[in-house]
Image (cartoon, coloured by chain):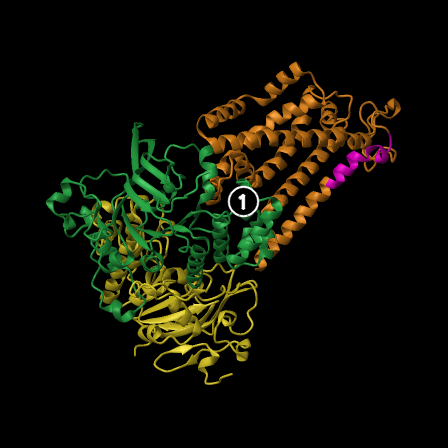
Amino acid sequence: MTSPLLEVKDLDVHFGALHAVRAVSFSVAPGETLGVVGESGSGKSTTMLAVLGLHPKRQGTVTASRLEFDGEDLLSKSDRAMRDLRGRRVGLIFQDPLAALNPLMTVGRQIGEVLVRHHGLDKHASRAEAVKLLERTGVPDPLRRAAQFPHQFSGGMRQRVMIAIALAGRPELLIADEPTTALDVTVQAEIVRLIRDIQQASGMGLVWITHDLALMARVADRVMVMYAGAVVEEAPVDRLYATPRHPYTAGLLGSIARLDQPRGVRARAIAGTPPSMDQPIGGCAFAPRCPLRFDKCTVAPPLIPLGDGVRAACWRLSGEQA
Amino acid sequence: MIDPVDTRLPVSEAVALKVQYSSRRRNCLGRLTTTTIRAVDGVDLTIRPGEAVALVGESGCGKSTLGRALLRLERVSEGAVRFAGSDLTGLSEAILRPIRRNMQMVFQDPFSSLNPRMQIGETLAEPLLVHGLASKAEARARVAEILQIVGLDPAVAGRHPHAFSGGQRQRIAIARAVIARPKFVVADEPISALDISVQAQILDLFEDLKERFALTYLFISHDLAVVRHIADRVAVMYLGRIVEEGSPESVFDNPLHPYTQALLAAVPSPDPVRERSRPNPVLRGEPPSPATAVTGCRFRGRCAHAMPVCAMADPALARGADGTHAVACFLHHQ
Amino acid sequence: MTGFSNRFLIGHAVGIAGVAIIVAAVAIAVFAPLIAPVPASQIDLHARLVPPAFVEGGSAKHFFGTDNLGRDILARLIYGSRISLAVGTAAALLGAVIGSLMGILAGYFGGRVDAAISWFVDVQLAFPFTLLAIFLLGTLGGGFYAVVIVLALATWVNYARVVRAQVLTVKVQDYVLAARAVGVGTPRTLWRYIFANSTAPIIVVASFSTAQAILTQAALSFLGVGIDPSIPSWGAMLNDGREYLQKAWWIATFPGLAIALTVLGVNLFGDWLRDRLDPRSAR
């Protein structure tokens, strides 16, 4: 086992009274894909933004007992050092590429800027390299496309441009936050394949954030399920889908409609709604919606190791029964 | 008042329907150019009483425009729209208004489909009061009743939409659509903006209401997995046209159109073992913009089976031997 | 969310300050005869140009001093608030009604209606308002109502423009389409859906239009048109003080301060009200 690329232990993020991320721990190894799945407000994106130091200091407080990238402590790094790290060693892609691209700059120049800043290429060389990157991300006619502006690209093509920018720094870790959510399924399939191909070729670590459990099955090696700001289960992808241990994971898997199931096999909804995050949560956050809750659930359960890299936060798994 | 007395009449019908928008703008030389967007480009669709018809397709294929056109919330450019046998095509808004109580709509985004300045009790009572179906006191009772039916506490009628979660707002929007007991409801991507754990709840609610009020649905969705489980009939749309139509069993288990096949092949399933053995995506590129004029088959640019005939003629939606499964593709035309 | 609640509380304090200023100004206007030390028009030629009490040579009898006719500045300020507040409020309200209606019609119906209304707005903005006001007041004759109408004509374009812009964003919201789908008629849609969701900018414009009307009324009095100069108003006082700026700065300074303070209060109140009226930010 190689040493982890990214290691996070007991990460907490507070926005005033709002406790957005609660004692989250995880690690990512080189070449591995960690999937982070959760609903809106589950803290999955907030966790990754906190890791990258992207929360404005005045708004949120980030604490962790350990936050290391390639053995270096990130909490003590200056803003400048973090900026440098983000462009070069850690790449980022978001859901909405249009918001992340500068509308007034050609796509080629935007990619080139990263190359100039992080690899010290001159203008000419960066231009040629940008075209190469566009070609690598599957943009047809890259020479002509490099001279165009973001609004001239379709959603799928823009996401390819974002990926090209993220790859320009030759990152060791790529964080993809819902990169295909705004895209149609046929385009999504292509983007998924592109990112996985690049990962296989470069051996970078990948964190893939999504709310789509079906997509997660396609992309991840290991999956971390988040609910109300905390990790409720973590498991290798096959184990998670075959034998979900946490009632929330099981409920989610049971609630999604599947194309590969005959009609009449009905999805079962999870009752209730996720808790509001600006209220303190006493005990297990999922308990009010949980079919298996018992008196112990008034105390928040820890993540219990269940062997084979599976961890789940549920008292039902601790061997204690009501 | 239009009332579909004859249950054999289709509830809603589109006949050779076209909806086009033209936008005129000056190009950089100051010349006026007109672009015509063919959002719906010749659609025939019949929805019978009690049916749940699903309209699937990718963004920009015209499925939302078609849904709105069936309710005459869009201007019809060519062809006709009928509701319960009467032609709605050229009717003015004033004449349509009394008909509207019989055909309702649920929108995708429950955060923008409810008036933030109205209490939800007012929003829900509105269809009853506008159409003179109830006095104020009766409306209050009906609002309480419908809130209970959609799974909300009747006591919340005095609150504004901002006090509710997305799932709860969608329940309110659905309650507004059914409170006047319409015959026909168009639901445009009603669950895609909701949290995953809440989506199945809303689908259950749609099923429950369908039975309770004998509703006919047009369910617009990009999510094929959901459609498979709720629809009685499926229509697949591509670039303004229906390319395949049939029962969910026939369309999902035996897709005929290359586009339907590619679409189904691209849908991920929550099964890592199956996903690992999935073949690479077959469909390349993206659909052309609905502003460009196409000759021949509109899918031919992305189709792996394109033949010379596909460039020459536009295949019509033709029914197969079973009389229900229809496809617009020369591979299946004799 | 400390950042949020802090901002909320500060906003609250500012709003209360605005309300306090407005309440004080209205109370002064309403109870003027009870508060004023002497009648506003009482001339005392023996006590002309007396400086304020807190300045050398001042007299405790005239706290803010006297003007060139020996009239008590404080008394005139107190009585003058009546005209200034009444004109400001009435003009801003009338302008709001006309302007909002025009803005809603232009934004909602678009096309020719929009073109016609926008043409009026453009013409009025291109025309020097003072000239128009002098012309109108010349033909209408002066007096309170004429001034209110002229000032409403000055401010309606502000409302029409922002309301039109707001309506353009509101009318494409799903809830407006939903209203149509339900079968809601046009008047109700305009009122409960379009107007109800376009009020935030109206309130902001109303606050600064009230301020603008108070100032313009002062300017018109300053130019000698509008309300009878013998009736005390802050604008007329400014006008009177103009000639004496060197010798007796207090004649113009105190009405100027009164205008500034009132305008500030109205603006603070308007900002706060806009935040409060939004159900999304209400607590």
Looking at the image, can residue A120 be seen? Answer: no
Outermost residue to the front: B6
Image quadrant for the N terminus of chain A?
bottom left
Magenta-highlighted stretch: main secondary structure?
helix
Q: Nearer the viewer, residue C91 or B130?
A: B130
Write the residue at 78% across / 38% down.
C27
Instruction: Looking at this view, name the residue that lies furthest to the top.
Output: C139
Q: Is B34 covered by the magenta stretch? A: no
For image coordinates 87% across by 30% down, the residue present is: C38
- Asked whether, in this view, residue C283 is left or right of residue B246, the answer is right
Q: Residue B99: horizontal and vertical position, in percent?
A: 45, 39
- Which chain is drawn using yellow? A
Check the image and name the residue furthest to the left: B308
Task: Name the tint of chain C in the rendering.
Answer: orange
Few, some or many C-alpha atoms within 10 Å of disc 1 (few <14, some 14-19, many ≥20)? Answer: many
Question: Disc 1: which chain?
Answer: B
Which chain is painted in green? B
Q: Is residue B195 above or below residue B104?
A: below
Quadrant housing residue B5: top left
| Location of residue A316 with respect to C42 vertically, above or below | below
Which segment is the magenta one?
A: C23-38
Q: Residue at x 70, y 46 (%)?
A: C17
Residue toward you, C105 or B310: B310
Tell me if B160 is positioned left or right of A253 in this view: right
* Disc 1 element: helix
Which residue matches tag 1?
A: B128
- Residue B302 appears at what percent x and percent y? 19, 49
- Is residue C36 highlighted in magenta? yes
Give above or below for C37 relative to A73. above
Residue C44 appears in the figure: yes
**Residue C39 appears in which quarter of the rendering?**
top right
Residue type, mark 1 in image: Leu
